[in-house]
Each structure stands twice: as C-alpha cells, then as structure tokens.
Amino acid sequence: MKIIAVCGMGIGTSVLLKLNAEKVLRMLDIEATVEAADMATARAASFDAQIVLTTPELVESLKGINAEIIAIDHFFDLEELNSKLSKALL
Amino acid sequence: MSVLSDSFGIASIAITESVADRTNAISLAGELLVASGKVTPEYIDSMLEAVEKFGPYIVIAPGIALAHGKPGDSVIKTGLSLLVIQQAIEFQHLQNDPVQLVFGLAATDHESHISVMAELAEFLSDPDKVKSLLTCSESEQIRDLLR
C-alpha cells in the first residue's frame, strides 16, 4: 500500500501530513508507506499509489490523478485523519 | 534543548500587534529567517510565490500558517521562524482563518527537516501549548515554551 502526501513545495504541509498519517496508520494497524511529494512530482509519484492526501485547496489541481484523493482540513487533528483513512481503507 | 528549539535561530521569533495583509505576514516571517541566517532574501519571493500559485493551503490548522518556499540556492540552513500576530489576519483559507501564528520554514532538501517537523507537529497538536504561545508578550517567553 502506498500513500502520497502532496503540497505545493513538498517540504512543509506534505511532510506534516506524512508524519501524522504514519501515526494514524500505525494506530489502525495498516501497513503502508507514505511519501511526501510536491505538486510537480505528485502525478509521477502516485502512479502506483492508492491514496493521495492533500489540502482542500489543492484537490482541484490534482483531479485526474490515478488514486483516491482525500482532503484534510486540520493537519493536527488525528481524529480527522483517522476517520478519513479508515473510511477509505477499511 | 530540543531539535525544535534549536531550529529557531537568534532573532527568528517576533511578536507584532498587526500586519497589513497575508503577503505582509508571510514576508515578515521570511525576514525573520533572513535575520537568523537561514535564508537569503530571495527565499521570501519563493514563499510568496507558493501562496500565489497554490493558494492559502499553508494554513495547516485553525489560526496557524506554515509559510515556506522551495529548497534551493536561497536556503543556507534548515530552520524555522515564528511571527505571532496579535490581531488575527485573514489568509482567505476556507476553514482555518483567521491566522495568528505564522511559522516560516526553510529546508535545504526534502529530508533534513523531518525531525524538526515531527517535533513541531507534536507541539502544535497540543491546543494548550498553542494557546500559551498567543499569550506571550516577549519572544524569550516563546523560546522557553518551545524548549
């Protein structure tokens, strides 16, 4: 299972998303690798990914990508990540 | 000392009463990175460009923005800055406006700052710690909280 966390530059938002997603996946006992990517590399990076995590603003620009796109509003709210990831994966 | 507090250089934290707008807030957070020797002034352009190009997605949680540009020549050292704005400002974000904490982030590459980000995420996950940041009147108090 591969998940890509995407933000504009690939160093800030996406890294925070990756870190918290990894935490939630451990809680859910789901084995997956989470990679951070920027908008420029997201399409290439997600060719074999099941899920793309990003912010609501970037969803539109990622449309057409070959994975389920999940928008996260509050990055430090593990509950939100937990419920959205569980819904997609369980 | 923690990785997090170490990543804030001297002169990287400031408290201001108000800012003109979002651009002003991001520029000031960028200037703190310049002042603390983490980036050259060109990096501020990259921080502003990110928001112009991709929108206010850098508002990562209610009231908190993480302003950053691209890793590249304008980054001298990985590090953080923090601007606390007493009168909250609109970033035109869908859910998380208005903003009072603007973190500036510089990273030399895509990996070197992961441990800093992990500690920052841990810190910001605690609503009480976020609240206490907002009550500080001196940057030294903020530095103590980050330790």
Image (spheres, rainbow, N blue to C red):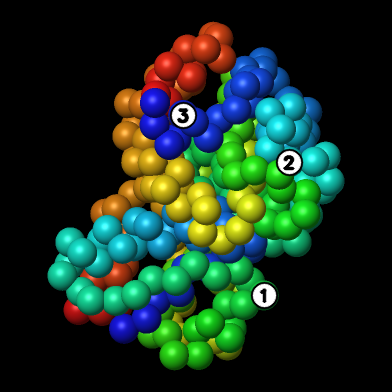
Nearer the observer, disc 3 or disc 1? Answer: 3
**Which residue, given by chain and number where applicable, does mark 1 sit on?**
A40
Q: Alpha carbon of mark 2 to alpha carbon of mark 1: how far?
A: 23 Å
For the residue carrying disc 3, how many other residues have a C-alpha within 10 Å: few (<14), some (14-19), or many (20+)? some
Location of residue B55 by image quarter: bottom right
Q: Secondary structure at mark 2?
A: loop
Q: Is residue A25 left or right of residue B118?
A: left
**Which residue, given by chain and number where applicable, does mark 3 sit on?**
B5
Kindly tell me whether residue B113 is visible in this rendering. yes
- Quadrant of the rendering where the N terminus of chain A is positioned: bottom left
Residue A76 numbered tag = none
- Quadrant of the rendering where the C terminus of chain A is positioned: bottom left
Q: Is residue B41 left or right of residue A85?
A: right
Which chain is home to disc 1?
A
Location of residue A31 by image quarter: bottom left
Residue drawn where x is 17% and y is 61% of the image: A27
Nearer the observer, disc 2 or disc 1? Answer: 2
B35 over A40 or under it: above or below: above
Find out whether the residues at labels 3 and 2 contact each other: C-beta distance under 8 Å: no
For the residue carrying disc 2, how many other residues have a C-alpha within 10 Å: few (<14), some (14-19), or many (20+)? many
Amino acid at the residue labelled 1: Ala
B15 over B127 or under it: above or below: above
Amino acid at the residue labelled 2: Val
Which chain is home to disc 3?
B
Residue drawn where x is 37% and y is 57% of the image: A19
For the residue carrying disc 1, how many other residues have a C-alpha within 10 Å: few (<14), some (14-19), or many (20+)? few
**Which residue, given by chain and number where applicable, does mark 2 sit on?**
B39
> Residue pushed farthest top?
B137
B65 over A41 or under it: above or below: above
Measured as percent of width and height from the top left, residue B11 is found at 66, 21
